[in-house]
């Protein structure tokens, strides 16, 4: 939340108010770079001091430290610290604006020239020539995995049946064999 100048005057002492006063516009825009740097350092020092006082007051309120002065509350010190922080932000922003104004304009000019060179250059799009490329490969001749040999289909099942039939004939199982299973085995044994 922004703090008005009137609130700043209420929170700060006369010396602190005269320190923060140049951080407002239009006075801020009239300061040189060295003055800005010196002002920022003085404000930073006061902000650190206010921060330390807030910490001490908070510790004293909790009973962890010694109460040096009970004249100012921790809330008022915290508000004072916020005033210094806002002043420091304004000074830093002005310092950045002044630094941007001092930057050479050559960088922007160099970028413009590079853009002009790129636009003027011939685009790299090679022509197709008299004939277009081969295009996609013809995949119609390649066949998908054909699967097992059609002559072998069912050979596993038939082999199982033949083995069962052999065991029945040679073993003690005895019993009648199905006609489809008996004929190949008997013909092999008779040979």
Image: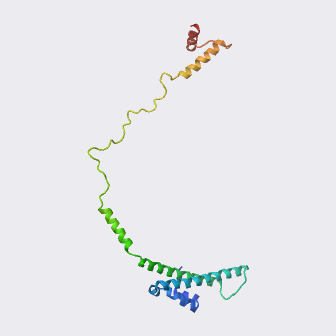
Q: Residue sitting at 49 percent across and 84 percent down?
A: 36
Q: Residue sitting at 33 percent across and 62 percent down?
A: 118
Q: Quadrant of the C terminus?
A: top right
x and y, in percent, of residue 108 in the image: 37, 71
Residue 148's place in the image compared with 191, above or below, is below
x and y, in percent, of residue 89 in the image: 52, 79
Residue 10's place in the image compared with 165, above or below, is below
Residue 129's place in the image compared with 147, above or below, is below
Between 178 and 93, the one lying in front of the other is 93
Number of marks present in the image shown: 0
**Residue 81 located left or right of residue 28:** right
Say which quarter of the image contains residue 186.
top right
Q: Give the colour scheme shown.
A: rainbow
x and y, in percent, of residue 154 in the image: 52, 22
x and y, in percent, of residue 19 in the image: 54, 88
Say which quarter of the image contains residue 55.
bottom right
**Residue 58 located left or right of residue 88:** right
Say which quarter of the image contains residue 75.
bottom right
Q: Residue sitting at 46 percent across and 32 percent down?
A: 145
Q: Quadrant of the N terminus?
A: bottom right
The residue at the far left in this view is 130
Q: Residue sitting at 31 percent across and 65 percent down?
A: 116
The residue at the far top in this view is 190
């Amino acid at each position: 939340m922004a703090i008005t100048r009137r609130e700043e005057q209420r929170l700060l002492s006369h010396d602190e108010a005269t320190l923060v006063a140049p951080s407002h516009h239009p006075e801020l825009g009239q300061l040189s770079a060295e003055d800005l740097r010196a002002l920022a350092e003085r404000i930073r020092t006061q902000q650190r001091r206010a921060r330390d006082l807030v910490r001490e007051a908070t510790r004293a309120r909790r009973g962890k430290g010694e109460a040096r002065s009970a004249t100012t509350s921790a809330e008022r010190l915290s508000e004072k610290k916020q005033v210094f922080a806002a002043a420091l932000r304004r000074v830093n922003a002005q310092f950045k604006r002044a630094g941007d104004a001092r930057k050479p304009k050559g960088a922007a000019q160099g970028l413009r020239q590079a853009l002009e060179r790129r636009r003027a250059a011939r685009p790299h799009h090679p022509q197709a020539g008299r004939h277009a490329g081969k295009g996609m490969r013809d995949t119609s001749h390649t066949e998908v995995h054909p699967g097992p040999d059609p002559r072998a289909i069912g050979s596993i099942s038939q082999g199982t049946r033949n083995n069962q039939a052999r065991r029945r004939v040679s073993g003690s199982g005895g019993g009648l064999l199905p006609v489809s299973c008996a004929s190949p085995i008997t013909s092999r044994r008779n040979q």
